[in-house]
Structure formats: structure tokens, C-alpha cells
Image (spheres, rainbow, N blue to C red):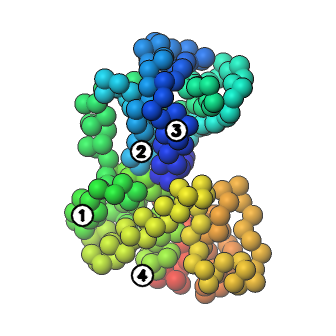
Amino acid sequence: MPEGHTIHRLAADHRERFGGRPVRVSSPQGKFADSAALLDGTTLETTEAHGKHLFLGFPGEEWIHIHLGLFGKVNFGDAPVPPPTDTVRLRLANPDSYVDLRGPTTCALITDAEKQAIHARLGPDPLREDDDRTRAWHRISKSRTTVAALLMDQKVIAGVGNVYRAEVLFRHGIDPYRAGRDLAAGEWNAIWEDLAVLMREGVRLNRIDTVRPEHTPEAMGRPPRVDDHGGEVYVYRRAQMPCHICGDEIRTADLAGRNLFWCPRCQSA
């Protein structure tokens, strides 16, 4: 499932290609056809992301709400616009560009009130400048749940996925099994600020890089990472490999249905 930086990047890409201009809206697959007909020819006024949720704003405070889930894909292209396949749930197009959405968990036309209800149930997002980190801290500081699980709970903090979760805990030397209530306020502030920096870089580069300059392949004289996810990381999907810092073996375990990665020495209890 894409992490929050990807959704913020998609919001920016939609805004750049289609914002402030009339768009053709269609649903070749048919599942969004009625809503597409209502929006066809109207102007895409704004785009917004919150965590893993994308919102496309149209006149009358109507929004297309998109959640990619595990299988959703977004593909942009330039004119001439090719005929769509019947797997395309949503297509936006103008004379210069088009974008196709396939396989999302959610693609729905919602009102502004319904959109606000989605925001209300999500935690603060490190990429939303006005979001308040203390909302997440109030929940974390009282919880017996592991900090690793809390970071993946979108009701606590929105947009963090498995990669950022594993990497930010490593970067701050925090045992992923530590209870949220045992985290210090200063540690939480450092995690939040680091996530904001890392995720902004993710938006800019369209990939996740988390190693510090002194730990890059060039600085350490090691081979670059080879992985479908791309980017240089410390622990994510590096189980049984040596830690870049201490040389101990990176461990993995199942936590709440997701693979957890950590270094037992660098992140000791």
C-alpha cells in the first residue's frame, strides 16, 4: 500500500496537470459512471491529501475521494489520449494530459461534510503543515500498545506505512516493542520532525530514502540497495542482513499482521 508521501505527490501531480481547468471525467469500467457524468466538463478546483486519502475538489463542494488500498494504481500520460481499457475506474482528461485510476479500494463522490468526517477520524499528517502533533501524542503517551503498532494506526498518525515506521524507529534508536506510554515527549517530537523531513523528500524524489549522508553506499563503499521499492534504507526488508551501523543481523517479526524490521543492538530496550 502506498505511504503518505505518494498520495501527497499524487495530489500535486493532479493539481499541476488538471487544476483550474475543465476536465473530461469518465469511468470506462462503469463503477463510477453516474458520478463521472455529474462531474464531466466541470473544473478541478483543488486537490488535497491526508494520510493515504486523496481528495479531488470540484464546484459545489463535491469531492472525489480516492484510497488506493493494496491494489490501486494511478497512471499519468500526455496527449494524444489513448482509448481506455475496461479496467479504468476513473479517467480525467484535458487536451494535454490524462490520468487513469485502476483498482482502488475507494473511488467515491462525496460531499464536503462527508470529507470532513474522514479528516476527523484520521490522525495528524506530518505533511500537512497545520496538523498538530500533540493530538497524536495525547494518544501515544497513554497507550500500552507498542510504538511500532501506534505509528501504523492511521487514527493516531496518518500517512506512515511500514517503511517509514521501521526506518524512523531505527534512526532514533527506539525499540519497536516499547509501549507508547514509555516514550518521552522529546522522543515523540524528534520522530514527528524527522518524519516530516523524510516524507517531504519522498514527495520530492517520489521514493523513500532514509539513510543519513554518512551511510550512503558512496560514503560507506558498499553496494547500493537492489529492491523494487528503491531508495536506501537501514532495516526495511533487510532481514538477516548486517546492520549498516553495528553489523548485527537485522531481525523481522510479524506485528499486527505486518512485517516489522529492526536492529536489536541499535534499538535495544
Q: In which quadrant of the rendered image does the C terminus lie? A: bottom left
Q: Residue at x 29, y 63 (%)?
A: 133
Q: Are marks 3 and 1 in contact (CB under 8 Å)?
A: no
Q: Residue at x 50, y 53 (%)?
A: 5
The three-letter amino acid code for the residue at tag 2 is Ala
Q: Residue at x 24, y 64 (%)?
A: 134
Badge 1: how crowded within 10 Å, few (<14), some, or many (20+)?
some
The residue that label 2 is drawn on is: 49
Mark 2 vs mark 1: in front: 2
The residue that label 1 is drawn on is: 134
Mark 2 vs mark 3: in front: 3
Provide residue 19's location: percent of width, then percent of height. Answer: 47, 35
Mark 2 vs 4, N-terminal side: 2
The three-letter amino acid code for the residue at tag 4 is Ala
Provide residue 117's location: percent of width, then percent of height. Answer: 26, 36
The residue that label 3 is drawn on is: 14
The three-letter amino acid code for the residue at tag 3 is His
